[in-house]
């Protein structure tokens, strides 16, 4: 464990990079519902089978076939199937949830319809339909199908001996019972897929191969979890209607600043004036953040050689706003002065000035004096790239938005059970295996698919230089990046990556011991910490 961390830290912290260097001034200077295999209680129509036995039942498929999506016999069925999910009831459904082993004795019913569009009957029963179930499947109420749980949210249904096949152009309805409750369409996951056990091939059911869940999930008609649930959820339509009931009124310029400044003074006879852009004097006082300011102004089409002068000054502040990120912003028609004790305060003064610009009225400003300080020292935003990877460009756009909203801490979740997203040169398996998800029961080339990622190989991670670029980009916008490495729990990506390394002969970084009962693939063996 200590060795792993030492390699990780030394690999990240050494080196430099990045070339962003725009300049300022006239001179041009983005309940834990995963359940462990050991947690699953056998239920009606559920087949309990170890992951090892599942591996042995399927033919081995090579890497080239995985990359190509393993087209084969599975596509014959998948190409003729469509999935339809209809949410039924969270309560008053007549199901004894406690008898099914449901936590808190809570469960809900959902109808699954498999519509077969083939012109000829399909009688093969050597297939499974896999999907991600964020709530535990408790029962299949159709004698022709049973179900099983592999790991995490990966679940499947498969035919029983009574299954007579799919009749031409007919649909089969399969009532299902899940744990807890479901109140929104996004409780369902995309990319359901067929696995044909004769050749091990996989194929995605096309109408689920989308991020638009409306393709296969019927609109929910109720959001009540329990009979006494009085929550009224707000959606885009209802919020629009509520806003329409608000009396129309003009909004003062100072009200455009988010978050609201600590104190604002607007002269009774203050002018509203038009500018062509800003020219910043004293940009060197911004330090590294001057490059962030220049870049943000450029992205918002604000001329950095405009006719309105901004003078930056380091100086004392009133006692009621003193602090490293505090500032005074004094706007007049002649010039604007920003005073702060540190560069961070100057940076936020400029962000406020940009926020005051009326871009719908030819870049107008209003005279005022703003005394501002943050109400909270830590103003954070979390992006979980471990479960759902986001590109470096997306993270940088997120940092831009954070800077404008004066958020100063990016909690970047880089690892979890479902993925490891940072290159560690000393341990290449962390990204060679841990950054990828596909349908590989051996998990020698990728982690098993989760969260609706489907069977085909998908991956993503930040190279060492990418991460250095993100750190520098954030620093230039007064954002601190806080990397999250989940250990010892939620560490499956790391554990399975080191298992893949162990299979190659290097056991020195192995994070689990199959001989130890408390050692699982979801957490690092606490005995080695």
Image (cartoon, grey):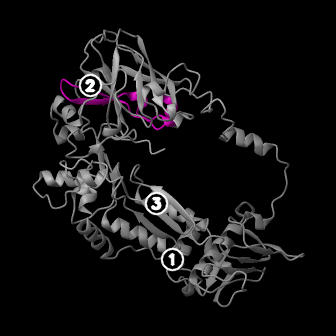
Q: Is residue 78 left or right of residue 296?
A: left
Residue highlighted by disc 2: 74
Task: Decide which of 181, 272 is in the foreground and name it.
Answer: 181
Query: Between marks 1 and 3, how big is the CA–CA gap?
Result: 17 Å
Q: Is residue 374 left or right of residue 152?
A: right
Label 3 packing within 10 angstroms: few (<14), some (14-19), many (20+): some
Query: Between marks 3 and 2, how big is the CA–CA gap?
Result: 37 Å
Residue 492 place in picture, x, y as percent? 30, 50
Compare marks 2 and 1 and give the one earlier in the sequence: 2
Residue name at image x 65 percent, y 40 percent: 235
Q: Is residue 347 left or right of residue 80?
A: right
Residue 386 place in picture, x, y as percent? 38, 53
Q: Element at badge 2?
A: helix
Residue highlighted by disc 3: 395
Residue name at image x 50 percent, y 31 percent: 105
On screen, residue 475 above or below 101: below
User: Which label is found at residue 291?
Assistant: 1
Task: Decide which of 8, 21 is in the foreground and name it.
Answer: 8
Q: Which residues are magenta?
A: 187-215
């Amino acid at each position: 464990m200590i060795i792993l961390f030492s390699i990780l830290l030394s690999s990240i912290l050494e080196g430099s990079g990045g070339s962003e260097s725009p300049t300022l001034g006239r001179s041009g200077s983005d309940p834990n519902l995963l359940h462990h295999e050991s947690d699953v209680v056998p239920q009606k129509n559920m087949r309990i089978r170890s992951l090892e036995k599942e591996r042995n039942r399927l033919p081995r498929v090579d890497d080239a076939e995985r990359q190509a999506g393993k087209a084969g016999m599975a596509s014959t069925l998948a190409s003729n199937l469509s999935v339809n999910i209809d949410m039924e009831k969270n309560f008053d459904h007549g199901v004894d949830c406690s008898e099914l082993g449901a936590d808190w004795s809570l469960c809900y019913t959902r109808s699954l319809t498999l519509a077969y569009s083939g012109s000829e009957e399909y009688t093969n029963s050597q297939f499974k339909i896999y999907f991600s179930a964020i709530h535990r499947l408790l029962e299949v109420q159709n004698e022709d199908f049973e179900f099983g749980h592999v790991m995490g949210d990966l679940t499947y249904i498969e035919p029983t001996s009574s299954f007579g096949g799919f009749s031409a152009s007919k649909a089969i309805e399969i009532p299902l019972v899940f744990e807890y409750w479901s109140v929104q369409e996004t409780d369902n996951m995309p990319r359901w897929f067929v696995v044909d056990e004769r050749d091990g091939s996989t194929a995605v059911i096309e109408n689920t191969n989308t991020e638009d869940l409306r393709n296969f999930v019927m609109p929910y008609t109720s959001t009540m979890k329990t009979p006494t649930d009085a929550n009224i959820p707000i959606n885009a339509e209802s919020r629009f209607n509520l806003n329409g009931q608000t009396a129309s009124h003009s909004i003062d310029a100072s009200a455009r600043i988010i978050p609201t400044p600590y104190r604002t003074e607007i002269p009774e006879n203050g002018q509203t004036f038009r500018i062509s852009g800003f020219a910043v004097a004293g940009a060197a006082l911004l330090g590294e953040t001057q490059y962030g300011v220049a870049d943000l102004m450029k992205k918002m089409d604000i001329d950095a050689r405009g006719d309105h002068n901004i003078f930056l000054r380091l100086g004392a502040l009133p006692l009621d706003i003193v602090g490293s990120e505090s500032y005074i912003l004094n706007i007049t028609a002649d010039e604007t002065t920003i005073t702060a004790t540190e560069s961070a305060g100057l940076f936020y003064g400029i962000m406020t000035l940009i926020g005051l610009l009326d871009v719908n009225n030819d870049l107008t400003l209003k005279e005022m004096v703003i005394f501002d300080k943050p109400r909270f020292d830590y103003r954070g935003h979390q992006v979980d790239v471990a479960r759902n990877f986001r590109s470096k460009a997306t993270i940088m756009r997120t940092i831009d938005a954070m800077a404008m909203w004066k958020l100063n801490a990016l909690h970047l979740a880089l690892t979890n059970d479902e993925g490891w997203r940072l290159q560690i040169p000393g341990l290449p398996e962390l990204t060679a295996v841990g950054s990828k998800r596909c349908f590989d029961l051996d998990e020698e080339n990728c982690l098993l698919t989760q969260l609706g990622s489907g069977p085909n190989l998908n991956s993503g991670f930040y190279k060492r230089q990418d991460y250095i670029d993100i750190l520098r980009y954030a620093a230039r916008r007064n954002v601190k990046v806080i990397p999250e490495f989940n250990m010892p729990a939620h560490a499956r990506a790391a554990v399975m990556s080191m298992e893949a390394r162990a299979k190659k002969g290097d056991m020195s970084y192995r994070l689990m011991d199959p001989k130890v009962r408390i050692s699982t693939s979801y957490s690092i063996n606490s005995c080695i910490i």
